[in-house]
Amino acid sequence: MSTSGPDPILLEQVSKNFGSFLALDRVSLSLSKGRFALLAGSNGAGKSTLLRLLAGLCKPSSGRVLIQGADPGRTPTVRATIGLLSHQTLLYDDLSARENLLFATRLYDLPERADRVSQALLHAGLEDRQHHRVRTFSRGMKQRLALARATLHQPSILLFDEPYTGLDQRASDTLSRQLSDLAAQGCTSLLVTHKMDTAAQLIDHLFILKRGCICHDEPWAPGRAAELHAVYERHLEENL
Amino acid sequence: MSFTARTLAILHKDILTEWRTKERLSSMVFFVLLVLLVFNFSFELGGFALHEIGPGVLWSAYVFASLLGLNRTFATERANNCLDALLLAPGDRGAVYLGKMLGNMLFLLVIELLSLPFFALFFNLPVGDYLLPLLGILFLGAASLASVGTLFAIMAGNAHLRELLLPLLLLPMAMPALISCVEATAEVFKRSRIEMLFPHLQILGVYVVIFTTLSLLLFEYVVEE
């Protein structure tokens, strides 16, 4: 693991208000290069808001969000290092799989577009459906295509917001294998999910967010699913 | 990253999507034709009345049709949170606004051109006599409505009552452009000299430049909140 340069993900005393509602309260966290972290928390804890801040899709009310040492909202080039996969596919239903990926290559100004898209479709196992509209795809196929779109520009930071939502066991396993492969390539990843058993196999760091505050932040040895459940439940029950 | 390339990519994607679905164009064209038909039976337009009422009829139909289209501007982006993908891409986010604005302008121009023969037919207008100056007014009118309407469409897009909010925001702001469009069209129908059109066209040109520039500057702040 590299120790040079700034941490890929760094939040310093970040708060986010929506009107009078405080979604995040002075959150500080950092994630070094190549780590795969789980951001756990109950519904409404502020997980998705935190991911949106990291992606530069909204700005903090106070504090600093730094991706590779720069503000993703103000530094457009930094956003090229981020890949986002969420429970929403970020795909156009009335475009074909190939057209969706080609559009992404044009947005990111990528070279060798046709070859890159063909490779991505092959890797996602969708080459035989590449000219079909996305609205005809199953949920699993859509999510494979969404991952292909999110990683087309070879980002070094990956943000996953409930990527397993709506997937059956087989599709979940496929997605987990793909996420594991990406982590092995050195991507820094932050995963938001309620699927603790699945996450336990992937992660090496654990954050727990509760009512907008980080209440747990420690490295995690992969595979201890039961312990992960126990730690999470303990934090949920505290101060109920 | 090329601003122009990203703008054109978004425009191309919008045209392709609309070509497939025809969601916006179909509703807009039917609305315009319905309005023209109703006014035709109500006023028995022709001759002198055409100069008096015709421009108002035409631009009333266009502005309300544009509201139908503008309300759908970001619908495809909202469907699967695609707007996040656009905003996450590197480069100036103004390209998203400009791509969408050009798409709106193009769709409105298509509606204007499709409905013009029907206007000529319903109101006995020898369209060939008026066509060239009218095209200039239609182009600038579409650009005016699209420039301000695209920004308001994204602002209203996150509101619960967006269909209500968009006209409330857009119509007062578009009024200077609409008045110029109506007056310029009336001059054309009255067969006035071409010099009589220039002040109105200048107002429209300045309006487009000001609101496009302002929207480009404001777009990033609007989408972040």
Image: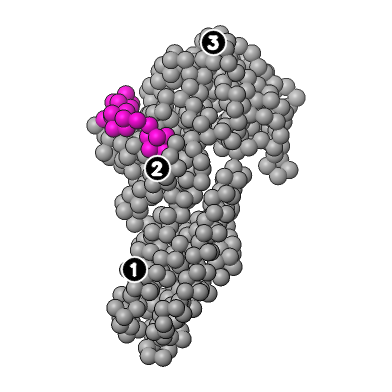
Q: Residue B71: percent from the left, percent from the top?
A: 48, 58
Three-letter residue code for mark 2: Ala
Describe the element under mark 2 as helix, strand or loop: helix
Q: Is B199 placed above or below A40 here?
A: below
| Residue position marked by numbered label 3 in the rendering | A2
* Real-space Cα separation, disc 3 to disc 2, in angstroms: 36 Å
Residue at the (35%, 52%) spot, across then down: B15
Three-letter residue code for mark 1: Leu
Q: Of callouts 2 and 1, which one flags the residue occurring earlier in the amino acid sequence?
A: 2
| Residue position marked by numbered label 1 in the rendering | B113
- Is residue A77 or residue B153 the one in the foreground? A77
Q: Is B92 placed above or below B162 here?
A: above
Three-letter residue code for mark 3: Ser
Residue at the (37%, 70%) spot, across then down: B135
Asked if badge 3 and badge 2 are on a common chain, one would say no
Number of numbered discs overlaid on the protein picture: 3
| Residue position marked by numbered label 2 in the rendering | B5
Residue at the (26%, 38%) spot, across then down: A131
* Real-space Cα separation, disc 2 to disc 1, in angstroms: 27 Å
- Its colouring scheme is one colour
Describe the element under mark 1 as helix, strand or loop: helix
Residue at the (50%, 61%) spot, across then down: B208
Q: Residue B175: percent from the left, percent from the top?
A: 56, 70
Tell me if mark 3 has few (under 14), some (14-19) or many (20+) residues whose alpha carbon lies within 10 angstroms of its own: few
Badge 3 vs badge 1, beta-carbon distance below 8 Å: no
Badge 2 vs badge 1, beta-carbon distance below 8 Å: no
| Residue B186 placement: quadrant | bottom left
